[in-house]
C-alpha cells in the first residue's frame, strides 16, 4: 500500500510505467481524476518510464495539464518535477510554461523552472501566482 511519497516515487516509476505501457493512456488520465492523492501522484510518476524509455513527453504533458491546478502540495511538487522533465524538448517546455506559469501553483512552478536559465526562471516566476 502506498502511503508515503517515497513509496510512490521509488516503486511506481518502473512498475507503474511498465504496466501503463501496455494499457491505454486513458487509465493514466482516469487516475488523475481520482480522490486518492497517491493514485494521482502515481499517474504522474508513471510518465517517467515513457520519458526514459521512449524519450517522449506526450503523455507527461497531457497528465500535467490535467493536474495543473492540483491543490495538494505533495502532488504539486511531483507535478513541477514532471513539467521540468518536459525539458528534454526545450521548446515544448517553454511553450508549456508560457501557457501555464501564470496559473499553476507556485510550488509546482518553482520545481518546473529549476533547470531553465536564470533569465527564463525570473520571467516565469514573475508570471506565477
Image (tube, rainbow, N blue to C red):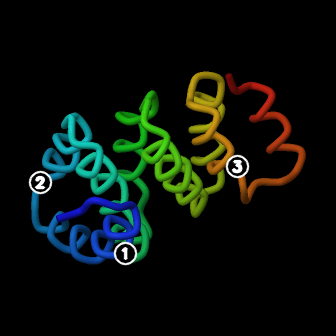
Label 3 to label 1: alpha-carbon separation: 23 Å
Does residue 84 sit above or below 69 in this rendering? below
Circles 2 and 1: CB distance less than 8 Å?
no
Q: Position of residue 84 (x, y in %)?
A: 59, 55
Residue identified by numbered label 1: 10
Q: Position of residue 104 (x, y in %)?
A: 56, 29
Tell me which corner region of the image, top left, top right, bottom left or bottom right, holds residue 29: top left
The numbered mark, 3 or 1, whose residue comes first in the sequence reads 1
Label 2 to label 3: alpha-carbon separation: 30 Å
User: Badge 1: few (under 14), some or many (20 or more) residues near its Cα, within 10 Å?
Assistant: few
At horizontal 19% and vertical 45% (from top left) the residue drawn is: 31
Circles 3 and 1: CB distance less than 8 Å?
no
At horizontal 47% and vertical 52% (from top left) the residue drawn is: 78
Q: Is residue 18 left or right of residue 106?
A: left
Residue identified by numbered label 2: 24
The numbered mark, 2 or 3, whose residue comes first in the sequence reads 2
Residue identified by numbered label 3: 113
At horizontal 45% and vertical 27% (from top left) the residue drawn is: 69
Question: In the rendered view of the protein, which quadrant contains the N terminus?
Answer: bottom left
* Mark toward the viewer: 2 or 1: 1
Does residue 66 sit above or below 127 in this rendering? below
Amino acid at each position: 500500500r502506498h502511503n508515503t511519497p517515497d513509496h510512490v516515487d521509488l516503486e511506481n516509476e518502473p512498475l507503474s510505467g511498465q504496466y501503463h505501457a501496455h494499457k491505454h493512456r486513458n487509465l493514466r488520465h482516469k487516475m488523475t481524476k481520482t480522490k486518492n492523492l497517491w493514485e494521482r501522484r502515481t499517474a504522474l510518476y508513471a510518465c517517467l518510464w515513457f520519458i526514459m524509455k521512449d524519450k517522449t513527453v506526450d503523455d507527461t504533458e497531457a497528465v500535467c495539464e490535467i493536474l495543473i491546478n492540483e491543490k495538494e502540495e505533495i502532488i504539486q511538487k511531483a507535478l513541477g518535477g514532471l513539467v521540468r522533465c518536459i525539458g528534454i524538448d526545450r521548446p515544448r517546455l517553454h511553450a508549456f510554461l508560457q501557457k501555464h506559469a501564470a496559473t499553476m501553483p507556485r510550488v509546482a512552478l518553482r520545481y518546473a523552472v529549476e533547470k531553465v536559465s536564470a533569465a527564463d526562471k525570473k520571467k516565469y516566476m514573475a508570471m506565477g501566482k
